[in-house]
Image (cartoon, rainbow, N blue to C red):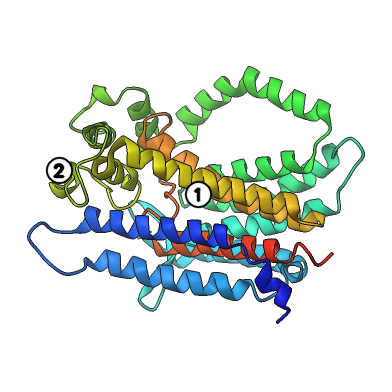
Amino acid sequence: MDRRLIQHFDLPLLGLTLLLMVAGLLTLFGATRTPGEGGLPPLVLRQAIFMALGLGIALVLTLVDYRVLMNAAYPVYGGLIALLLLVLVIGQIGGGSQRWIEIGFVRLQPSEFGKVALVLMLARFLQDRVRPGGMGLADLFWCALLVVPAFGLIFFQPDLGTSLLFLILAGTVVVFAGLKRWILVTAIVLGLAVGPVVGYVAYKYVLDEYQQDRVVTFLNPEEDPHGKGYQTIQSRYAIGSGRFWGKGFGQGTQAQLRFLPEQHTDFIFSVYAEERGFVGSVVLLLLYLGWLALGLNVARRAKERFGTLLAFGLTAVLTWQVAINLGGVLGFMPVTGVTLPLMSYGGSSVLTVLICIGLLLNISMRRYMF
């Protein structure tokens, strides 16, 4: 191995990731433990195994030059489409959605890994479309044509949160790659002008009943405090009850008395905030901001366009997941089911996040090679 790879290893990025992994396991322990019982809760053990596996995959990914992935981008994305089609045929159903494929004793969610496949495909597609003044409508059309199949297959699982995340990721990477100014301005004006109408039509005629309920709950959870609004209200109680310093590790009453539904997945931040309070919540947000800063720095220092686009896209995956999850938990937007990276329970989510970190480490280590 070239010694310069080790010399340029991004220790701050790895260290920050390890801190978030520890915080996630401790919070999951508080969310899943049964008061009065000893031992490690099964979900914590499973999460730790997935984290160890994901960390191993991340370190293995650093050994191969990321530019090799350029040739694999379209086949990987094609494999994602095939898996999403397979999910609709033989996928496991849970919570009213058909999102998982069972392999032995492990359930994997292809749409989680699809975030990496999407970013990889977009980086490959956009790197060759550098235009003076930005890309035009033809480039935008072909890009949309590539993204729509994955979006549609995920939407019909149904998984509104992840499908919308795909659109947001695609739009973020495309805007970063560069659009003609008039296209960007026109898109913003049209969005502001017809967005409310499109949103209303989608709400009435496209969304399922449970998805409509989430919108109603977001707008006024107090309308049905013991039914549809219960989860959101209990989440706010948990966060507020942590006050400034928090109640202490494993001492959150909302979590321990199981007042908070989905507390180990979508609402894991509520458990964390109750135990560690305002101060601990700020620290966690700073850790995530550190992730964003380090990821953008990797994109900035990459010496060729594919590396820059890939690093930016991977950073967008992590950042948007944090923003969307916290937005739902804090009541700034409807709950979508998007996980909080390395905090929420879920093997596919953990593996996806650590694959992103492994690729970012890869790009960062090879910035000197050009």
Find residue 32 and report its horizontal and vertical position in percent.
Answer: 22, 57
Q: Is residue 282 visible?
A: yes
Residue 351 position, x and y percent, is 48, 65
Q: Is residue 370 above or below residue 53?
A: above
Picture residue at 67% right of the left edge, 40% below the top: 171
**Picture coordinates of residue 4 (x, y %)?**
73, 72
The residue singled out by tag 2 in the image is: 253
Question: On the picture, is 329 further left or further right than 194?
Answer: left
Element assignment for label 1: loop
Q: Which residue lies most toward the top here?
A: 193
Q: Residue furthest right?
A: 132
The residue that label 1 is drawn on is: 156
Percent of width and height locating residue 241: 21, 34
Which sits earlier in the primary sequence, circle 2 or circle 1?
A: 1
- Graded by Cα atoms within 10 Å as few (under 14), some (14 to 19) or many (20 or more), the crowding at tag 1 reads some
Image mark for residue 131: none
Q: Nearer the viewer, residue 284 or 177?
A: 284
- 218 left or right of 113 in image: left
Q: Looking at the image, can residue 110 be seen?
A: no
Circle 2 Cα neighbour tier, 10 Å, few/some/many (<14 / 14–19 / ≥20): some
Q: Nearer the viewer, residue 354 or 302?
A: 302
